[in-house]
Amino acid sequence: MRHARFRELLLALFFVLSGTQACADTLADIRTRGGLRVGVLDDAPPYSFRDPTGRRFGLEVDLAADIAATIGVPLQLVPVDVVERIDALLDGRVDLVLAGLGYSAPIARAVALVSPPYYASGTSVIARKSERLANWASLAGVPVCSIQGAADNERLTGDFGVELKTYKSADDAYEALISGDCRAFAFADSAIVTQLRGDREARWKDYEMPLRPLGEHPWVMAARPGDPLFDAVLTGIAVRWHRDGTLLSLQDKWKLARTPFIESLRQIYR
């Protein structure tokens, strides 16, 4: 049934777009190749991460699997990091990026960002309770870990004067926090909450998330520019995730706090 609806959507989109200028045909490339290549983060639980056997799991992995199933092709997960995820898309290593990508105007000029967003988060910090952090200003001059290319890195240094130490992965940043290389780790608030109440709770019993998040960043899928058909298909899938409650169910599955932003989109598209 899902594939039948997808074929009907493709037929409708073909007539809408047939009068436009020639453009890339990502769907045809995917079918010829025999699989959808999705760039995902390698160690960003609970969004995308590996278990000890090397298998990948997480909210974004589940979404990637749903896209491949909807199109009707096998899924190939391609590990990318925050720094290279856009390059991996533009140089053709992946067809789609689902890797914690927050919307920004510079990125929107380089690639096609799919609306509506599938998630949203704000930047907060995890730190030892003994740090007694009262507000963001209390981090001035303090060594703080973050991920390379994270959305609020410039704000952390410019507005709050932190001594920023960046790492390629969340696991590396968590280890730096535990070892004392930094006194706080600035990361997505929902991921911190999940970490604090997760299976490794004993490891984090002396830690907390003491600060209110810095705003809320919508997370979007990204595709190569110049293919309105593929963009339209991805948009239709993202709308369905909101309409049928897929995103709410996945937030519950991965023990993520339900964000007001996603709750509001559910009301718009239901």
Image: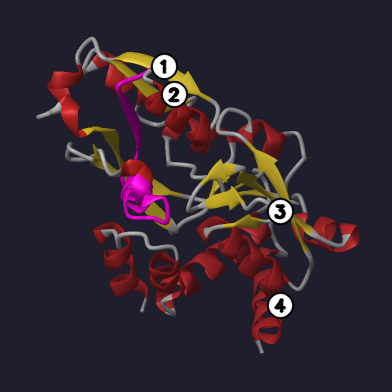
Q: Where is residue 22 in the image (x, y as percent from the top left)?
A: 77, 51
Mark 3 falls on what kind of element?
A: loop
**Marked residue nearer the N-terminal end (1 or 4):** 4
Q: Are dots 1 and 4 in contact, CB under 8 Å?
A: no
**Marked residue nearer the N-terminal end (3 or 4):** 4
Q: Are dots 2 and 3 in contact, CB under 8 Å?
A: no
Label 2 crowd (10 A; few <14 / some 14-19 / many >=20) = some
Give amino acid for label 4: Leu
Nearer the observer, 58 or 84: 58
In the picture, the disc for residue 176 is 2
Write the residue at 62% across / 66% down: 233
Front tag of 3 and 4: 3
Q: Where is residue 36 in the image (x, y as percent from the top left)?
A: 76, 58
Q: How far apart are marks 1 and 2 (CA)?
A: 9 Å
Q: Where is residue 94 in the image (x, y as percent from the top left)?
A: 73, 45
Q: How far apart are marks 1 and 4 (CA)?
A: 50 Å
Q: Do we see residue 217 in this rendering?
A: no
Q: Are dots 4 and 2 in contact, CB under 8 Å?
A: no
Front tag of 3 and 1: 3
Give amino acid for label 1: Lys
Would residue 198 be counted in the magenta stretch? yes
Give amino acid for label 2: Ala
Mark 2 falls on what kind of element?
A: helix
Front tag of 1 and 2: 2
Q: Which residue is identified by label 1?
A: 165
Q: What stretch is highlighted in magenta?
A: 181-202
Label 1 crowd (10 A; few <14 / some 14-19 / many >=20) = some
**Marked residue nearer the N-terminal end (2 or 3):** 3
Q: Which residue is identified by label 3?
A: 53
